Every structure is written in C-alpha cells, then in structure tokens.
Image (tube, grey):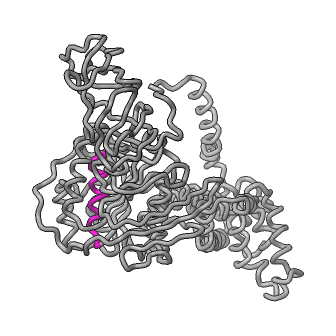
Amino acid sequence: MKLPRILALLAGVLAVYLVAPFVAGLGQLGQADWAGVDTGGLAQASIVSVTSATLATALVALGGIPLGYVLARRPGRGMALLGFVVQLPLALPPLASGVLLLFLLGYASPLGRLTGGALTDSFIGIVLAEAFVAAPFLIIAARSAFASVDPVLEDVAATLGHRPWAVFRRVSLGLAAPGIWAGLLLTWLRAFGEFGATVMVAYHPYSLPVYTYVAFGSQGLPAMLPILLPTILLAIVVMAASLRGEAPQRPRPFQAHALPLPPPGPIPGRVAPAQTLAFTFQRRQDGFVLDVAWRTPARRLCILGASGSGKSATLRLIAGVDQADRAALSLGSTDLTALPPYQRAIAYVPQNYGLLPHLSVDRQIRFAVDCDPARAPYWMQRLGLDGLGHRIPAELSLGQQQRVALARALSRRSRLLLLDEPFSALDAPLRARLRADMVALQAEIDATTILVTHDPAEAILLADEVLLLEDGHVLQSGPIEAVFQRPASEATARLLGAEAVAVGQAVAPDRIDIGGVILDVAGPDLAVGPIGWAVRPGSIRLGQGHPATVLRADPPRAGQRRLMVQIGTAILPAIADAGCDAALGPCHISIDPAAFQIWPATTTARNPA
C-alpha cells in the first residue's frame, strides 16, 4: 500500500529532529576539550550509574512483573485505581519525585531515623530513586504483555495438571516474555539516565547524569562531548540488545484439509470404564444466573443451547477453571467438587483449541504433567499428525490444530473429555469430516465425552444423552432420541432444529389428528389431547400416502427442490429431488413416523410457517 504523503512528511520531520542533535554533536568533535576530562571521576560515575541502574531494574522486576500480572488479570475499580497510582511517577517532574522520596526516606522520616540516614546521600539512595521513577515503564509493559496472553491458555494448562506457579512460569511468563524484556530495557535506560530524583535523594556518590551536570557547571560546554560519550555508547549497547532475537520465520506450507485417520489399533493404557457423572452448579455473574444440574451414566454426552445459554460456562465449571457460588461434581465414586483443576485429571479442549503458540506440536502433546509416554505417539499417528511434530500452531491449518488439541487431551489418563464447540471454526466440508472422525474416536476411548454445541446435528451424531440449556437454566435432559421425539415445549423443539411448528390432537398413543388427517408417529406413548408438533423437511416424501397440496415449489438447486405443502391444517416445508414433478396443486405425501417431534400444546403458536 502506498504511504500517504502527509504521513511520510510528518514522520520525516520528527525523524530529522531526533537525529539532528547527534549530528550537531559530531560537528563539535574538533572543539571538544579532551585533555580536560577527569578520566577517573568519569569512570567512577559510569560504574555507579551502570551498577545502580542494574540493581534498580532487578528490584523493580522482582515486584513489577507480578504487579503487571495482577493488574492484567484482576479487573475492578480497586485494581484500576492501583494501576493509575503506580503510573504517577511518569507524570511527575523528576525533582518532585525526589521531594516525595525525601518525605519517605529522608533523615527526619521514620525510615530515615530507623536506618540512621543510610537511605539518602548514598548508593542505596541512588538505587531507590531510580527504581521509583523507572518502575512504571516495566509495570506498564508487563501489564500489556500479560493482557495479550489469552487466559484460556492458562486455564488449559491448569487442566493439564500444572499448578498455578508452573502455569505462570511456563505459559503466562513464557508468552509475555518479549513485552517484559522490552519493559526491562526501558526501565534500565530510564534508571541509567535519571537525574532529578537522584540529585535530590543522593547527590553523592556522583551518578553519570549528576557528574555531567557538575562538570558542565565548572567546565562549560567544551567538556561535555567527552563526558557524554560513555552515556551515548552505553545507551547504544543497551538498545542494540533490545533488537537481538531471531528473525521471524515464514510459516511452512500446510494442507487445509483433514488428514485421513489410520486404521484403529490397540490403545496403550486405556482408562477405566465410564461411570455416572453428576453435577449441580449455581452461579450469578454480571446479571446472568446459571442454575444447572444433571446426573447421567451415559458415556457420550452433549450440552446443547443457543449462544449465551450457559453451555461453555457449565463446561468451565466442570473443568474447575471457574468457580460457582454453589457446586457439586462427582464422577463415579470420586468427588471432584473441592479439587483444583490441576488435580481433576479432566481433559479440556476449549473453543479455540488452547494451543500454546510458542510450543511445537511435539511439545504441545506432551505438555500435560501426566502425559502417558506410550499414548502420545499413538495419538499423533492415530490422528494423522506424523511429520508435523516440529511445527508451531501458526503453521497448522484449523483442522490440524483441532487434531493436536485432541491428541494432547487423549494422551492423558483422564476419564472425562470436555469439548467446547470443537467444530465451530471449521468450514462445512472439514466440519463434516471431523465429526465422522470424532464418532470413530468415541468408539475407541473409554472416557466419557461432554460436547458443547449449538448444532442439533452434532448432538444427534455424537451424543447418547443431551442437556438442553436456555438462559442458564435446564429446559430438558435425557436420551437424545427421546428428547428429540418428545421435547418438553416448543422452545425445546426449536432448539433441536424444528423449522416449522403446527398444532394437532393426539387421538391415540401413536396417532395424531392434524385437521382431519390421521398420522402415525413413533416414540413414547402420547396422552390424548392437544399437542404441538414439527417434522424434519427431509422426512416428507411425495408420491404416495396422505392427500396434500403443493402450495409452492422453488427452482431446483444443488439437486434438490424445496416445497411448501399443506396437509390437513398444517403447512410444512418439504424437500424433493430436483427431477421430481412437483406441480402446484393436489398431491400425496408420506411422513416417516420417527421424524415427528411432539410436545404439549400449551405454548404452541398456530402454524407460523
């Protein structure tokens, strides 16, 4: 993209201004008083500044990095106020900072009397003054660096068995390191060049800025260039250190499609058979109330609901990365309620897969504390990841990233596998392929799987039992087929994919009347009385069966034709083959009895189709 002229002009003006003083200084090399320089005094001042800046930076790092992390991870007014206060030294004139420090450290202060005045007019005083004025640079840099680290990565590391300190060291600090390193360099440079606060707190021994000020007052401008030379050289060295590092690598080419699964084989160290899962969670946060409970012995489970219904929140509570106001969680005879996430031995795959961007595929899969050395290579081969072990996540397709996250989860001896919308970021063909692969994997593993999704097709394919959520509350739960055939309400039916709903009358345990037309239905027995109902469009066939009327026939698309047909008092969508003679007017249709969804008619609108 071509750079706008005004931007180039403004950038050039500032760049020239910043370079100009150095050029002007070079022009004075011949006029400098090289002979009049006190080499010993200059060397001593340089040592004082380098040493004090290094100690001040270390002192700031000891508390500044944790403070940056706390400010980034603990929202609230108190933290916002603290973040404002610790940045105030940036806004204060350096002399004002020195005066404030004298109130704290001076001879007349409690600390000053306690230490006998050792905190001022001493090397310790220089370090403390430099730490005060330079600390905000590291705190701001660390806060920004930690804020850029996705908290989900920390959550995933915790579920992989890492304790809080290990999570901070191996994930948070590892990912924030470039920003923190830049903050440390800025902190050192600010401490090295500090004059105002230093001259107020500790005039002696001379630091390099104070020595420069004294020399200027006694010798004038000709002596300045030789004295400034060590300062400029040291600054150049430190700035050069900030630029070191490897050049960014170009991602290697990768295939965007799913890799075929190898034939099934024996799984090393299979876990124990699935046991009854039971949980109760109540949580109120930011006006949203979550109140869910479920008890089921099934091995393939699904939590289904629209966005914002509390699906992912429930999964995070099961994983232990969030806390509920009231909670109970057990798997078989094991009570997990009070256990932290690193002790629950639960495999958790979040929506974005939670891959650590700085680790290769090999290290990702072996990142769990309890990774089984025999299972890791097995699942890499089983999921088609051979040859990708050296790549980082940025060099993988979405499908490959999903497989790495699954391999990492399956390489542990866990009895519960949590999958949060694992296919939501994938395109339709890849999503269909990986769904089929997941069915094969579920048949191989003994762990209970809980899938969170908003897609009824995924629930039907990958779950034996389903929990339906809406606005944080349970609508219905039970075996997937029973819930589909007998939803508790119209809202539940629509959540399960009902496109058009109608009303009718149950006239027998397995028959309904929809305006004079009697239809057979499958599923649990019906109680005689008014009902609401829906049917999948693909289950309606033209050509034989009950009399009906074609009201609309759309043009053929992708080998199919969408119709609107009336049967009895109901108007329903239907799908026919593109070559089907679907003329408007009378026809006959048949409906698969197992395709009906039927519920009590108390809240059902009359045929909104």
Residue at the spot 37% in from the left edge and 65% down from the top edge: 296
Q: Is residue 6 magenta?
A: no
- Residue 233 appears in view: no
- Residue 141 appears in view: yes
* Span highlighted in magenta in the image: 398-413
Residue at the spot 64% in from the left edge and 57% down from the top edge: 228
Residues 487 and 246: in front is 487
User: Relative to residue 93, is residue 557 depicted above or below?
Assistant: above
Q: Based on the displayed image, in which of its 4 quarters is residue 90 positioned?
A: bottom right
Q: Is residue 595 left or right of residue 39?
A: left
In which quadrant of the rendered image does the C terminus lie? top left
Residue at the spot 56% in from the left edge and 28% down from the top edge: 8
Residue at the spot 47% in from the left edge and 55% down from the top edge: 312
Task: Give the percent coordinates (x, y) of residue 483.
Answer: 37, 50
Task: Give the percent coordinates (x, y) of residue 73.
Answer: 59, 62
Task: Give the percent coordinates (x, y) of residue 274.
Answer: 29, 70
Q: Is residue 209 left or right of residue 589?
A: right
Q: Is residue 411 magenta?
A: yes
Residues 78 and 603: in front is 603
Q: Is residue 440 left or right of residue 394?
A: left
Magenta span: predominant SS is helix
